[in-house]
Image (spheres, rainbow, N blue to C red):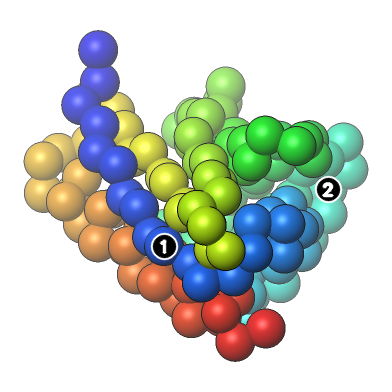
Amino acid sequence: MLASRIVQVPIRKPFGQVYEFLADPMNFARWASVPGTEVEPLGDGTYLVEVPTGQVAIRFAPRNSFGVLDYQAYWPNTPNGRVVPVRLYPNGDGCELIYTVMQHPDVTDEKFASDIEWIESDLNRLKALVEQL
């Protein structure tokens, strides 16, 4: 079993508004990793995105009413992709975004801690962006 850590951010905007923003793959690069990077559609619901470690192909979960925003990321060394669990929950007149980070066998403890910091930074950027919309 992989070690994991939950990264959570409260967002002071209605669930529906935040979900619609996050469910649109073209918004991904507005907040994740390298804001302003182009998101290139590859077809079949897969998109190419630039991240600090290089290019990654991402396939997003289909739109749904449950707040599931999972995506599957394909780096060169992960031919089957890694599922990234992401959930959005209503919370009063706002919502909570929950991102589960898993430590895969090829990731050192130092890299895992760095990845968590990277994700926290991305989610805080997302929070600031969405709360200004």
Say whether residue 59 is visible.
Answer: no
* Residue position for label 1: 10
Q: What residue is rendered at 24% in x and 61% in y?
A: 117
The kind of residue on which mark 2 rests is Leu
Residue in front for this viewpoint, 54 or 31: 31
The kind of residue on which mark 1 rests is Pro
Q: What residue is rendered at 56% in x and 50% in y?
A: 90
Q: What residue is rendered at 59% in x and 75% in y?
A: 130
Left or right side of 46 for 89 = left
Pointers 2 and 1 in contact (CB under 8 A)? Answer: no
Q: Residue furthest top?
A: 1
Say whether residue 128 is visible.
Answer: yes
Checking the image for residue 42, the label placed there is 2
**In the rendered image of this protein, does residue 81 appear above or below residue 26?**
above
Residue in front for this viewpoint, 70 or 36: 70
SS of the residue at dot 2?
A: strand
Q: Residue furthest front?
A: 92
Left or right side of 17 for 3 = left
Residue in front for this viewpoint, 95 or 120: 95
